[in-house]
Image (cartoon, helix red, strand yellow):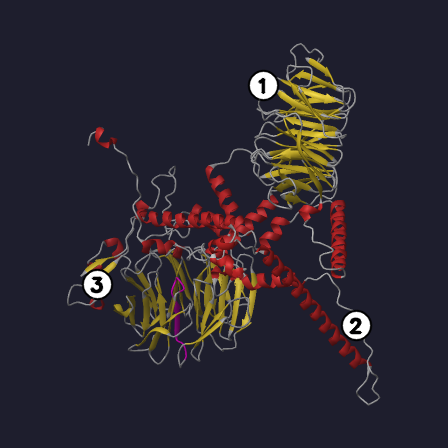
Amino acid sequence: MGRGAGKGKKTKRKVPIDEKKMEKYRRGTGVNLKMGIKNKIHRQRLRQKENLIESMAEQAARTEILLTETHGYLEKDPGETTTQFKQSEIVSNIDITSATKYFELNLEFGPYSLRYTRNGRHLVVGGKKGHVAAFDWITKKLACEMNVMESVHDVCWLHIETMFAVAQKDWVYIYDNQGIELHCLKRMNRATRLEFLPYHFLLASSSSLGGLTWLDISIGKIISRYDSKIGKIDVMTQNPYNALLCVGDSKGVVSMWSPNVQQPLAKMLCHKQAITACAVHPYGTYMATSSPDRTLKVWDIRQLAGPVHSSILRSTAENLSYSQSGLLAVGMGNVVEVFSDTNNDFKPYTRHKTNWSISDLQFCPYEDALGFGTAKGLSSILVPGCAEANFDALEINPYQTKKQRREAEVKALLDKIQPELITLDTTAIAEIDVPTLQRKVEEKKKLLFIKPKTIDFKPRRSKAKGKGGTAKIVKSKKALKELARREAIEAMRQAKTLIDTKKIELQKKSYGVLNRFIPKAKQTKC
Amino acid sequence: MKVKVLSRNPDEYLRETKRDIHKVPRNYDPILHPFEAPREYTRALNAVKLDRVFAKPFVGNLEGHKDAVSCMCKHPGKLQVLLSGAYDGEVRIWNLPQRTCEYNFLAHDGVLRGIAFLSGAEHFITIGDDKTIKTWRARKSDNNEEAVPTNTIISKTILTGITHHRSDAFFATCGEVCQLWEETRNEPIRTFKWGVDSLHDVKYNYVQTNLLAACASDRSIILYDTRETGPLRRIVMKLRTNRLSWNPMEAFTFTCANEDYNLYTFDTRKLSTPVNVHMDHVEAVTDVDYSPTGKEFVSGSYDKSIRIFQTNKGHSKEVYHTKRMQRLTSIIWSLDNKYILSGSDEMNIRVWKARASEKLGVLKPREKAALKYSEALKEKFASHPQVQRIARHRQIPKHIYNAQSEIRRIREKSNRKQTNRRMHSKKGAVPFVSERQKHIVREDA
């Protein structure tokens, strides 16, 4: 096109964005500007703010085209099911680097528990018979390996990949990535499960005596310790959305604990028998529970109402884990089944069978892999489409350098959320606390300058036994005074309303025939 | 069967050489950023704490005057020049970035009452208690001669204040009467009078440049129009107004510093009540000056403190004081909106930052963005009790603290008494008078 052709009026119009995409980036519905805001200036200011928030959501939605990766998938041809594909078939159809993510390690100190770091690069494993190892599982580079010569119940990474906690026979130990013991936490005794809350820097443990302990690892202080009074805790997991601990007990109840309240914030009766496993969706929307009667239930955790899905499995689910994209891995005996929930259709997605019974499983964040520990080692299998494809490097970066890790650690410490802010609803802090505000307004209203009327009180002295007495006189005097004070307040309030009505009457002005042009609302008010 | 497994090429995520910058892929999906509200709250709390940590507003002081500083004048075009006059009649010309005195000489016998730059800023005029108006060259002569005024006018009346027109060659003085002068003439071109009063401050409006406002010792504020022969209007208050300052952005707004510890913002379109009453000083307010944005003003007081107010707020947002600073006589907000200059009784001129915790010097873009972000967070969480408590906390001298509690007690007492009186008298006999109306006696036109 020549230069002359573009001479006409150029209109730069932005490409409209899909409303669904916008909805993802919006934070709530915003303020209703048409209702309740009487002041023009306030309305204007709020409108500007709303516009700003809307444009922010729009900008964020526009950045989606810059995302480089697309998530994985496993598609069937007609007449096939996704569950029929074996790992060997999947491996033969993908590139060699991805194929290395399917492996099996035969170890003899099992049954093993395992945990990935938040960026999915590193793995720590702990065998029941004392074998502890940490390694970069993608490059298969071993960081440390040792035998702690004690039983190991659970392992857990701390905020970075240089430190991990191990729940051993009596106490919890913290090791660094060279295997050097850094701390021995004797106050966390007989721990069965460990959870690390990364944004709060809290290491939570549940003990075989029924205790729950939160330790702030940035200051080395135990924040709180409760006796949950539910006996030995075998099932404990965190809700990544609000950092509450979900504890399953032998009566089929899942209780949610925060370090601020001695009682659970919420309790859900999920099953008629004991809870064998519990997992919470990374976005805090769903919770899956299972029990020995072979049932598996998925709950909407925000409503605490009836199950979204309920199904009966072939055998008891002993381990559950949610992936970033919402796939649910279920460990039943020596079978791992991954369920997907597409369009409210809860059904198996892939299936994998091993030789040994599964002791622990976890999806790897940011990689299409599922790791599980068995009685005789651990393995990693491929589950296409289970992970988030695009990471945010300022939040979690799988490719971070040492320097970046150090900087991120400092940043994270500065943003450490205080344990007092662990509540059911995390957004509550950014909203208006209406009850307190109401109380404040009430108190202001009650503020009176006047003194209550003095009461001239001379009781009849009763001669009858038990009727008179100084105590009784004082009591009735007090009651009368209170009554007088209340009356005074009531009178004052009425006086105030009288003044108000007078003012309104003054405003009411007749324009004769032109009264019909007075706005309707104003008329009713007068 | 179609299968794709997530497989990232590390080359796309790692920098090529060590000199390269790191690659930072972003994903703004809110789900990948959990705990948004508590994290923002924590950041806001940190920001407000750091704000208090870095709140070191005192920049430096200019010493050299041998008597208390009586008045100051900023250069209309150069940020680095400041003129100051003292009670012994001495004028000093300061170089602000160097914090040195460039030039000083004795201009008047007795107190120097006012300084103003002439148009072009090559010369300035001073007035003093010796009833003279002298014009001086603003630059030191090359051959170290003694300073000689280029022009001297002997006035018939005493002179207490001076103000120069924003652009034209006019200036106005006040004393027994308000006089309008042309720079080149030795006689006033107009004289304004309203009853028998003496004026102690006069100010030209910056926007509506033919408007003048003056403070009179009979507790009134008078408005003059230079195009007319007589004064326009006046408002009489309960106590005397010491100084006033026009809002440089709104033609109709001015703020006056009153003897009754308060400042009042008036709208010339409705003089009968002030638009706002600014309380917080515990003794007479001696001077006031607007920031060039017109959103804030600074006031100096006899209680040895400087306060910064927002024009639409009743209470101050900032208070500055030092152990050595005595009663304030004059105050100036610099034209770059960054500094405040205060002259006080103990012969020093002090330079303060207008925003106590602001970082001086050049900011890098990332630094700027970070500061903006924390500013937005502070605003968002401003009403949270924790944030509010830290943001509001100020260390104040004991005498101010005690005076504040005393004033509070007095106010409560009178309120209580008024309410009791109202309760025990006929309805409507003791009317409600708003704080804005309380301090006004009457408006004359």
Check the picture and name the quadrant holding the C terminus of chain A. Answer: bottom right
For label 3, count other residues whose C-alpha is less than 10 Å away and answer few (under 14), some (14-19) or many (20+). Answer: few
What residue type is disc 2 on?
Ile
- Circle 3 residue: A88
The answer to whether B215 appears left or right of A155 in the picture is: right
Real-space Cα distance between discs 3 and 2?
94 Å
Image depth: mark 1 or mark 2 in front: 2
Quick check: is A281 in the magenta stretch? yes
Q: Are marks 1 and 2 on the same chain?
A: no
Residue B246: image location, x then y, percent: 62, 33
Residue A196 vs B140, above or below: the answer is below
Q: Which residues are magenta?
A: A274-284
**Residue at 76 percent of width and 48 percent of height:** B402
Can residue B149 be seen here?
no
In the picture, the disc for residue B120 is 1
Q: Secondary structure at mark 3?
A: helix
The answer to whether A84 appears left or right of B334 in the picture is: left
Real-space Cα distance between discs 1 and 2?
78 Å
What residue type is disc 3 on?
Ser
Q: Are marks 3 and 1 on the same chain?
A: no
For label 1, count other residues whose C-alpha is less than 10 Å away and answer few (under 14), some (14-19) or many (20+). Answer: few
- Circle 2 residue: A455
Residue A378: image location, x then y, percent: 33, 65
Quick check: is A191 in the magenta stretch? no
Residue B226 vs A507, above or below: the answer is above
Circle 1/circle 2 CB separation < 8 Å = no
Residue A431: image location, x then y, percent: 50, 58
